[in-house]
Amino acid sequence: MQSFVPSKNILSASSSRYTSYTLSNYKKLPHIARLSDEQKFVIDVVGSVLPFKTNSYVVNELIDWDNIPNDPIFILNFPQKEMLDPVHFSEMAKRIRREASKEEIRKCANSIREELNPHSAGQLEYNRPSLNGEMLSGMQHKYKETVLYFPSQGQTCHAYCTFCFRWPQFVGIDELRFAMRETELLIDYITKHPEVTDLLFTGGDPMIMRTKTLASYIHPILAADIPHLQTIRFGSKSLSYWPHRFVNDADADDLLELFEEIIASGRHLTFMANFNSPRELETDIVQEAIGRIRATGALVRTQSPLLRHINDDPGIWADMWKKQVKLGCVPYYMFVARNTGAYRYFGLPLVTAWEIYRRAYQQVSGIARTVRGPSMSAFPGKVQVVGVSEIRGEKVLVLQMLQGRDSDWVRKPFFAAYDEKATWLDELKPAFGEERFFFDKE
């Protein structure tokens, strides 16, 4: 295994200093002078309902401030008015205008949040496992091979994506939040479930933790030496939002040594990187960060939802996949924007999503055609839109599950009546006059 190259600290300490910006201090940004008072008011209103956070790297290196408000990275970080229903926007706006108390604003925000489908696809009710009669609030086990783990100290991010389907993690409502500190319960659970081969650290973002903290979770897992645990994954946006984490943060080398420890234990390590725009792949620092992660022996897989206003163009996806392959990454998933939070702003009809995927796929070589999509992480499983066809004189959507709550459902084709407006599985009706889809019987 090729070892990573120790950091050369190619950037000065000042250029790599992390500064976070939220509702409380974003108006101090020099760039904000480019925004009108109305645009700033919109950020205050929407940011009081949906989480808002960005940082110095994003605002200085990624956003094109000459292309405001249309720049995709700006939209990816800064709240837009249409991200809230007009009624919800009006309810919050009148409170912001009259400088209502923090408690009144909080109650209004929570009331709106309840209507935004905060835990889509049954995450809260059906995905949390139990051990010896105790519900494990910081884990999900939807698919038999893979357990998701939400370490309590990794439940924030370097910046918040405005489309994020896990926005309830960041709004301060404990009953909507997944988090767990006890690694012992995780180990006990996996040990008792030999069908589990993969453990995914998610959040939030596990890369927000210092290496010493992350190691306090990883080392007990490695020491347990669970024979059927083959793969450890990290789901992270940090390569996009703070690539310094892997190059010149104070403990960057320690983090990469931890990656090497995982691989030396005989396990596969996959870094699940979220890139939503080609711009996120173009800076020198992100390219160096990717190279350093790969040098540890870890595999970098890439994924993103398909998002209106951000990447709803086949050329953007083809460009993104080509750049990823050139950097040694493996394109993995094109997701459909989940039906939660601001999805009415970002979502696209499933037929449109399929057309974008198909046309982008046509523009890349077989090396990039590892990517799967468009895929909905819906209640029964990861449902892929395979295409549009005509069967027995009826125009239909052809679908299949790439993963399912019941593994017998995987790769079983099924058909929905053609609907050019549907954006999610529950908006589709079975084809051929059937009353329900096969999985509804379960």
Image: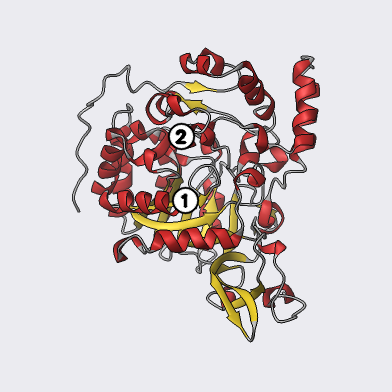
Q: Quadrant of the N terminus?
A: bottom left
Q: Quick one: label 1, few (<14), some, or many (20+) residues within 10 Å?
A: some
Question: Residue drawn 35% across and 35% down?
Answer: 243
**Residue position for label 2:** 208
Closer to the camera in the image, 117 or 94: 94
Q: Amino acid at mark 1?
A: Asp
Q: Is residue 232 left or right of residue 291?
A: right
Q: Amino acid at mark 2?
A: Ile
Asked whether the viewer can see residue 371, the reply is no
Residue nearer the viewer, 153 or 51 = 51
Mark 2 or mark 1: name the one nearer the start of the chain: 2
Q: CA distance from mark 2 to mark 1?
A: 31 Å
Q: Position of residue 399 (x, y in %)?
A: 58, 72
Q: Is residue 266 above or below residue 51?
A: below
- Give percent across and percent down for residue 53: 55, 28
| Left or right placement of residue 217 versus residue 172 in this view | left
- State which mark lies toward you, 2 or 1: 1
Residue 313: numbered disc: 1
Residue found at x 55% / y 74%: 410
Q: Which mark is residue 372?
A: none
